[in-house]
């Protein structure tokens, strides 16, 4: 009996590790697609031609495209083929890369690389904490998502009013918020794995968790870049 429980526990733990590796692997692939596409669109000058041709519509169009892909990604997640879910994730990563190509105008390359390095170390530490902690982080979900909505509203109001005095405060709050969300999403990845015993569904959940962690990484990077980057 003891041996059976031990083998069962070992099998769950081993499956969890493989699931986590697969999830972080897809998250890393999404970041790679974003980084490579951002560099390509920046150095090729494509983003400038699109920016000059669309003007103010550029931001609106990018927002609509990203929201559209997110809606398509999250809808019918349990029925859609895994290959389609993966494709939508990579499409979103590509669109984000095109959007990020404009960062090269505001920040010098050294600042971008420095912020990325800090983000990688910081995110990795949070992932370890979220994976190993025994504290139930899921109970903080409603508070985290409510705070995220409030933060988004505050940033939109700040963008339209043009006020600059609260930028650093909101940046700090945003970084702290996504610090909690990252550890939360890592633990949620484990819980979703344990709640599902269908391998195909676990593959879908792996891409879904990779997408959430990808967004966490992107937002932490942007907040850190605002803190340490020198604007051109």
Image (spheres, rainbow, N blue to C red):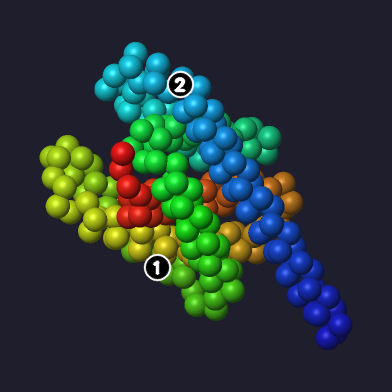
Would you say residue 37 is visible in this rendering?
Answer: yes
Q: Is residue 50 toward the left or the right of residue 209 in the image?
A: left
Q: Which residue is mark 1?
A: 140
Q: Residue at x 50, y 33 (%)?
A: 38
Marks 1 and 2, how far apart at CA? 44 Å
Q: Which residue is mark 2?
A: 45
Q: Residue at x 33, y 17 (%)?
A: 52
Whole-percent x and y of residue 132? 59, 74
**Lower position in the chain sequence, tag 1 or tag 2:** 2
Q: Which quadrant: the C terminus?
A: top left
Q: Residue at x 83, y 86 (%)?
A: 2
**Which disc, if any, is residue 63?**
none
Q: Residue at x 68, y 48 (%)?
A: 203
Question: How many marks overall?
Answer: 2
Taking the view exactly as shown, the residue that stands out farthest to the bottom is 2
Q: Nearer the viewer, residue 180 or 166?
A: 166
Q: Is residue 165 toward the left or the right of residue 213 in the image?
A: left
* Secondary element type, mark 2: loop
Q: Relative to 109, say whether 168 is above or below.
A: below
Whole-percent x and y of residue 206? 63, 50
């Amino acid at each position: 009996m003891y041996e059976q429980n031990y083998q069962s526990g070992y099998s769950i733990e081993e499956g969890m590790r493989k699931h986590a590796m697969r999830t972080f692997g897809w998250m890393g692939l999404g970041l790679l697609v974003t980084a490579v596409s951002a560099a390509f669109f920046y150095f090729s000058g494509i983003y400038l031609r699109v920016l000059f041709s669309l003007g103010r519509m550029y931001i609106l169009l990018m927002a609509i495209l990203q929201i559209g892909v997110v809606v398509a990604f999250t809808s019918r997640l349990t029925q859609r083929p895994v290959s389609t879910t993966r494709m939508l994730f990579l499409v979103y990563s590509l669109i984000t890369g095109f959007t990020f190509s404009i960062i090269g105008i505001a920040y010098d390359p050294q600042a971008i690389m420095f912020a990325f390095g800090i983000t990688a170390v910081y995110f990795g530490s949070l992932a370890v904490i979220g994976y190993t902690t025994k504290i139930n982080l899921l109970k903080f979900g409603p508070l985290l998502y409510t705070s995220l909505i409030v933060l988004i509203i505050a940033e939109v109001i700040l963008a339209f009013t043009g006020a600059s005095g609260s930028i650093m405060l909101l940046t700090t709050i945003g970084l702290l918020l996504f610090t909690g969300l990252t550890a939360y999403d890592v633990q949620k990845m484990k819980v979703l794995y344990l709640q599902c015993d269908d391998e195909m569904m676990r593959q879908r959940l792996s891409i879904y968790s990779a997408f959430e962690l990808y967004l966490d990484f992107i937002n932490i990077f942007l907040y850190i870049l605002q803190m340490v980057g020198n604007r051109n």
